Image (spheres, grey):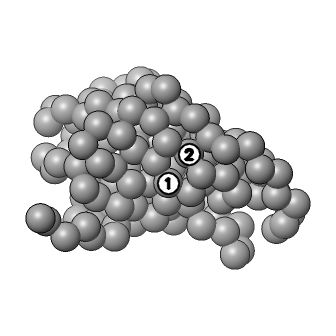
C-alpha cells in the first residue's frame, strides 16, 4: 500500500495581485496527480494565514474526502479527473460550536464555502491549489 504523504494546501484564495496575473478564467493547469490516498494541510485561506492554534485538513480516499475544518469534522464524496476537474458532493459536517480562538467559526465557514465552490485543482511540488469555476483560486 502506498504510504500517505502530508502535503500543504496552497492558499485557497490567492491575493488580488496573483489573481490579476493569471488573466484568464480557464481551469488551473496542473501536474497530473492522483488525489487518492493523499493528505493535505491548509496553510492559507483567502490569502491569509490561518488563525493561531487552528488546523484545517483535507484527506482523499478512493471516492470520499474529509478532514478537520478548525472546529468540526467534515466529509463527503468527491470526483477528480486527470484533466484537473474537482467536485465535492454530499459534504456533511458535525455541528460543534467553538468559541476559541476568536474567529474560528468564521474561518471554518469560509473553508466550507471554498470546498463547495471547488471546480479544478493543480499540484505544484507538494502544494495543492483549488479554484472555482471562474478560475479564482480558493
Position of residue 91 measured from the top left corner of the image (x, y, whole percent): 52, 33
**Front-lying residue, 23 or 26:** 26
**Does residue 60 lie above or below 113 as drawn?**
below
Position of residue 94 measured from the top left corner of the image (x, y, whole percent): 67, 44
**Does residue 61 lie above or below 81 as drawn?**
below
Q: In which quarter of the image is residue 79?
A: top left
Numbered marks: total: 2
Question: Crowding at label 2, few (<14), some or many (≥20) Cα neighbours within 10 Å?
Answer: some
Q: In which quarter of the image is residue 50?
A: bottom right
Q: Which of marks 2 and 1 is nearer the N terminus?
A: 1
Q: Is residue 16 left or right of residue 83?
A: right
Q: Residue at x 17, y 48 (%)?
A: 34
**What kind of element bears circle 1?**
strand
Q: Residue at x 82, y 58 (%)?
A: 98
**Mark 1 = which residue?**
67
**What kind of element bears circle 2?**
strand
Label at residue 74: 2
Q: Which residue is drawn at 59% across and 51% down?
A: 73
Position of residue 16 measured from the top left corner of the image (x, y, whole percent): 55, 46
Q: Is residue 14 left or right of residue 22?
A: right
Q: How far apart are marks 2 and 1 (CA)?
A: 6 Å
Position of residue 74 measured from the top left corner of the image (x, y, whole percent): 56, 45
Mark 2 vs 1: CB contact within 8 A: yes
Amino acid at each position: 500500500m502506498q504510504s500517505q504523504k502530508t502535503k500543504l494546501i496552497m492558499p485557497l484564495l490567492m491575493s488580488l495581485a496573483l489573481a490579476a496575473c493569471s488573466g484568464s478564467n480557464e481551469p488551473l493547469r496542473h501536474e497530473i496527480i492522483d488525489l487518492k490516498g493523499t493528505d493535505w494541510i491548509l496553510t492559507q485561506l483567502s490569502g491569509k494565514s490561518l488563525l493561531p492554534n487552528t488546523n484545517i485538513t483535507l484527506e482523499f480516499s478512493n471516492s470520499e474526502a474529509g478532514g478537520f475544518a478548525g472546529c468540526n469534522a467534515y466529509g463527503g464524496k468527491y470526483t477528480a479527473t486527470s484533466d484537473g476537474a474537482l467536485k465535492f458532493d454530499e459534504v456533511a459536517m458535525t455541528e460543534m460550536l467553538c468559541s476559541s480562538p476568536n474567529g474560528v467559526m468564521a474561518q471554518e465557514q469560509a473553508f466550507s464555502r471554498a470546498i463547495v465552490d471547488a471546480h479544478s485543482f493543480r499540484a505544484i511540488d507538494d502544494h495543492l491549489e483549488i479554484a472555482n469555476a471562474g478560475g479564482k483560486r480558493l
